[in-house]
Every structure is written in structure tokens, then in C-alpha cells.
Amino acid sequence: MPQASPIANTPEPPYWAVIFTSLQTEDLDGYDSAAGHMIELAAGMPGFLGYEAAQEGVGITISYWSDLDSIAAWKRDSEHLAAQGNGRARWYRRYTTRIARVERDYTFERAETAAP
């Protein structure tokens, strides 16, 4: 299930981030549906912590995971493998996946003030 906030609420580090950056093709038929399904599918996987995504020219999706074994299981998931195949065949001109360990994180959130 997709999260309510566009910024993931992650636990205390350390945890892992999978950073997927992409350039899309013009053929995006079925992309939005597949992307939504992948988020729902990932959210049900053991070790999934949340995600963040933005698309403005370059697409960036970051998924957060508790451990490397969970990331490897996600990469091997049969529906995810099928979506990866569609991505290479139709939706992406280029993409890069990076896996990084998050050692520290910092959060700022402005307090809401009541209108006078």
C-alpha cells in the first residue's frame, strides 16, 4: 500500500536505499499502472520500509529496505522481473540503480501555525 506522505518515514539508521534514476521513452503505455502495482507489491515484501519518487525529466525513485537480503528478494520477484523486462523493452531510454547503506539521516518539519 502506498504511503500517505511523499517523504518516507524511515526507522533509525542503519538501513538501505535503492536509488533508481531513469530517463523514459515516449512509449509509456501501461507504465503508471505497472509502477503503482510495483509499489504495492514492494510494500508487501519483508524488509520494505518505504519509498519516495519524483518525475521531472529525470525520474528518481528511492526505496528503503532493512537489509540486503530483502533487496535481493525484491530483485528476484517474478512480477518485478516482468516489469523490469517491460522497462528495458519499452519504458526507459536509460536507467541506473544504486544501492547504498544509510548511516545517518536528519529531518526538519515546520510546525503548522494557526491563521490569525
Image (cartoon, rainbow, N blue to C red):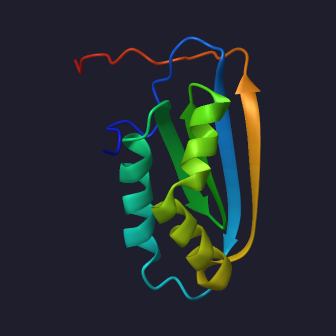
- Nearer to me, 16 or 61: 16
Quadrant placement of the C terminus: top left
Residue 9 sits in which quadrant?
top left
On screen, 36 above or below 9?
below
Query: Percent from the top left, x then y, of residue 38?
Result: 44, 57
Query: Percent from the top left, x then y, of residue 57?
Result: 66, 67
Most extreme residue toward the top is 12
On screen, 81 above or below 90?
above
Query: Percent from the top left, x then y, of residue 115?
Result: 24, 21
Query: Percent from the top left, x then y, of residue 96?
Result: 77, 58
Quadrant placement of the N terminus: top left
- Nearer to me, 56 or 113: 56
Q: Residue at x 48, y 30 (%)?
A: 49
Q: Residue at x 44, y 46 (%)?
A: 42
115 displayed left or right of 100: left
On screen, 71 above or below 109?
below
Q: Residue at x 50, y 40 (%)?
A: 51
